[in-house]
Amino acid sequence: MKRLLFYTLILALTVVSIILSIAYLTPPKVIPKYSDDKLRELALSKGLKPTPNSYEKLLELVDDTSNPMNASKIALGRELFFDTNLSKNAKTSCSTCHSFDKELKNRGAMSKMISSREEQTNNCVACHLRDQSGVDRFTFSEGDNHEPHPYLLNTQTVLNSAFAKHFTWSGEVSTLREQSKNSFLAYHKMNISAQELEQRVMKSEKYRKMFSDTFQDAITFENINRAIEVYLKTLVTRGAYDRFLEGDNSAMSSDAKRGLANFIGFGCKGCHSDISLGGQSIQRFPLRDFAQVYDLKPNFELFPEFRRFESEFPFENSGGFLGKNKEHLFRVPILRNVTKTSPYFHNGAVPKIREAVNVMAKHQLGRHLTLEQIDEIVAFLRTLEGDIVEYDVSESR
Amino acid sequence: MRTVIKILVFVMFISGVLQWKVIEMAWEDFRVIQVLHILSSIAILSLLVPFIYRHIRRYYFIKKVNSANGWALLALFVLLIMSGFYLFLIGNRGGDIVGILSFNIHLYGSFLLIVLFISHAFFTEKKLIVSVGLLFLINPQTSHSAQMLSNIEVNSTRSYHSEDWTSSAKCKSCHSEIFRQWSNSNHKHMVGSNPYYMVMETLAGEAEGDGFRKWCMGCHNPSALLNGHEKTTHDMEGNFLRDELFEKDAEKLSKDFKEQDNFRLEEGVSCVTCHRITDASSKGNASYTVTLERKKYAFEDSMAPLGHWFSEKLINSNPEAHKKSYMDPLYKESRYCASCHDESHPINGIAIVSTFKEWEKSEYNNPKDKSKHKSCIDCHMTNLKDAKLSPLRGTSTDGGVIKEDVKVHYFSGSNHFLAGLKDKKNEEQTIELLKSSAKLDVEVKDNILSVGVTNVGAGHHLPTGVADFRELWLDVEVKDRDGKVLFSSGKLKEDGNIEDGSRLFQKVFGDENGKPVGLLFWRYKTLLSDTRIAAKERRVEKFELAEDIKHPFSVSVKLNFRIYPQWTTDAVKKVFPTLPNPPVVELLEIKKEFE
């Protein structure tokens, strides 16, 4: 009996000490320290690119012979994008959800709002219009007449979508034009039929003139969406990150540079790739099955806490959306301006960027990042913020 | 076996004594030894108890040796174990005598125990020197975690992360009453839950560029600022801005803390923000130094519930270091408060709020005569009752020492409104303070009605702070015997604003062209008017009544206060539609009949 007790004790001690030493036996991945030029070289070699700084370069990247870009078409698209008359109740425009100010340099949204006599419907605009985020900052999108999205999906940004290959959360749409059409027709978005849309556009003198200048044929549903497509392609942002990639070492802070090294080193860039840092592929989320059931929080703490997720996702499964084919397949979101587009994930269940980074690291990379690493990555993501570039389109073509 | 037991008893003794104040052990070692002492004591107990049992059986029952020394040793040992458990599970928080007794028994008893133990165990044996020598080989300085933590201390230039800002919800478990007071006070509601602030910060960013927000954030949101955030954020609830206007006791903060621990940053002025200010000057505009590096007990940062529990026990059993790291004599000085309650334009340096400077010139600043000297906390952190300062007898820690004047954390000033939406007690405290600040007198000579307003209670101007957004005015009504109004002044218009020509005590800011600045107060260049009342000053306002006024008539004068002008609230309501209108508070009323 005594001996049994003794061996049990020894065994328990051994097991406990092994568990406690796991943290030291499995050292964290060390991201090497790069010089600024090395880091830039590394980023470029991994396919990360700055956004074009001139209209000509933009055309090279995004122009499409089936719907060539030109100044009058872009101007027409811009008018259509901000026109609330193009929704059923004439209250919603594309920019209601994909919000930014029509006048890009306008700085007075808040002063305008507090001095106006009207009641506003979307109060977020007062503070966030100037963010130029291209989203409504809601948890889930609301269309014309406040119709919520059936799956309570969060609005995605239209900015920099020109560089994406897939659109919407499931990634099943492959062109901007197609998605523009969907948005007009969807009852939870603009809620308007092709016929009625054409009629409304036709009624306007301004549009009749603009269409005849731009298109050979008539005002059609197709042409409306062509114009919107080319306008969307010009909505590109540039920030400190782009300046860094182009050779300005002072553009990014040292924290942000380490964040970029982490971003590459830990493998985030595997999916959040190319110019737009996302939108290039459809991936499974969450990737790690273990994480769906148990979340070691925090890993290897002296007193670990086990938390069980009762959900499909490592956050609340509001809306019940399960991705493409209900197989947890999602388009990789565009990370440019991500710090301005909270809340996060398809149903907006994660309110803060640090929490989102943590979820991604844990469930996609299977890593438990240190708080410092998370903050560095967030500092890097901040350098992806940028204002919409005002390309000089007038003289071209 | 016996040698092992002897060594273990000495280990417990030494590891205990090392925690003694007199030893002045380095903190990094202290916090490790504290844990080792407790954990090893529990482990050692499991060895000692069977040993003692066998020892007594062998010597007393079998060999029939009766050692008085041995029995004393046993009694003392039991006493030490009991006091040890009490210290660990309940603690020495200062409020209960058992805790204090346990601490002293545990500390001094251990010396007696070791003397008794030596005489009992080594009286006949000569292994004493060997054993003591062995003990000194155990060097506590080689602990791994101690080294790791001391590295952090060296690296003092690092930027702070959210986990450095220990959530105020953590303090709640032992300081529940103080937490409750603070959670409904204005110091808690300076950022996301304060609609006026959110509008103003955005407006400042819009008008002056986003970088300008940092000026606001220095005092309003130091945690976000020092973590490198560029603006203040707010919570969402679905598609709506979370309405925190009516939320009591910071429920969301406690919920966040439960789910996220410190992972989600607590924005605004939290417990540690003020209680980790290590230096401050009266310059204003956030002229303080925050040092979050502090003495933390083992497992204080643990995210696991068991770790939380354990660290609390460690603090309670010996709270000396905890107390020291959150209290500083500086906190009683006015310059500490001045670091934020004086405010000037960050670029041109024009003074905007000068509460501290007003106090400095007042007779309340009298460091030579302690009986006449009154610092900020003597009024603003002292309990009030019936418009009088009435120090509260109680504790600041649950189960702690009874203090004659617990510094309450209502932070009563003038903003009764936002605090009052959450908790009536908080509102009451502020209104009591406001009522204690002034006195009214009234006189009629010929046809001139003179109203005297004396600033009797405030150690600064009345009103102070953002006096451009405070409304303190006289509401005057003269009636004849039939109740017909002969004269009136200071009534509200239909739109809620005060009628023109009323007598307000305030300052009005103008821009460089002499136009009122409205909401953009930082554009202040010229002072258009300043009718505030300095400390102890009596201001007389004269109202001209009709020349042929017939006696008898009655005069009723009220001193009214409103925290924000209606036009300001109207602007904020455009963005925060659920915001109610702040009420007009009647501070004083005087009625007089003139025969």
Image (cartoon, coloured by chain):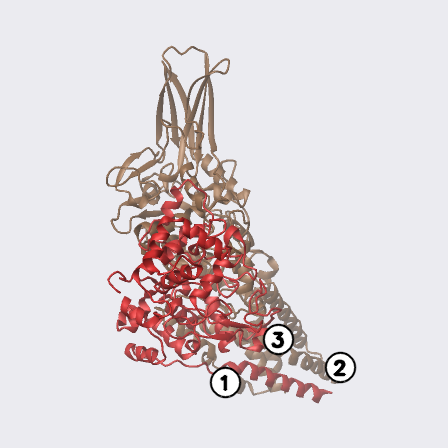
User: How far is the residue under mark 2 from the one under mark 3?
Assistant: 28 Å
B294 or B394, which lies in front? B294
Q: Nearer the viewer, mark 2 or mark 3?
A: 3
Q: Quadrant of the N terminus of chain B?
A: bottom right
User: How far is the residue under mark 3 from the one under mark 1?
Assistant: 28 Å
B330 or B544, which lies in front? B544
What is the crowding at mark 3: few (fewer than 14 residues within 10 Å), some, or many (at least 20)?
A: some
Disc nearer the start of the sequence (2/3): 3
Is residue B579 in view? yes
Q: Secondary structure at mark 1?
A: helix
Q: Is residue B434 above or below residue A324?
A: above
Q: Secondary structure at mark 2?
A: helix
Q: Position of residue B263 (x, y in %)?
A: 49, 65
Q: Nearer the viewer, mark 1 or mark 2?
A: 1
User: What amino acid type is highlighted by mark number 3?
Assistant: Ile
User: What amino acid type is highlighted by mark number 2?
Assistant: Phe
Is label 1 on the same chain as label 2?
no
Chain shown in brown:
B
Residue B42 - label: 3
Residue wearing tag 2: B61
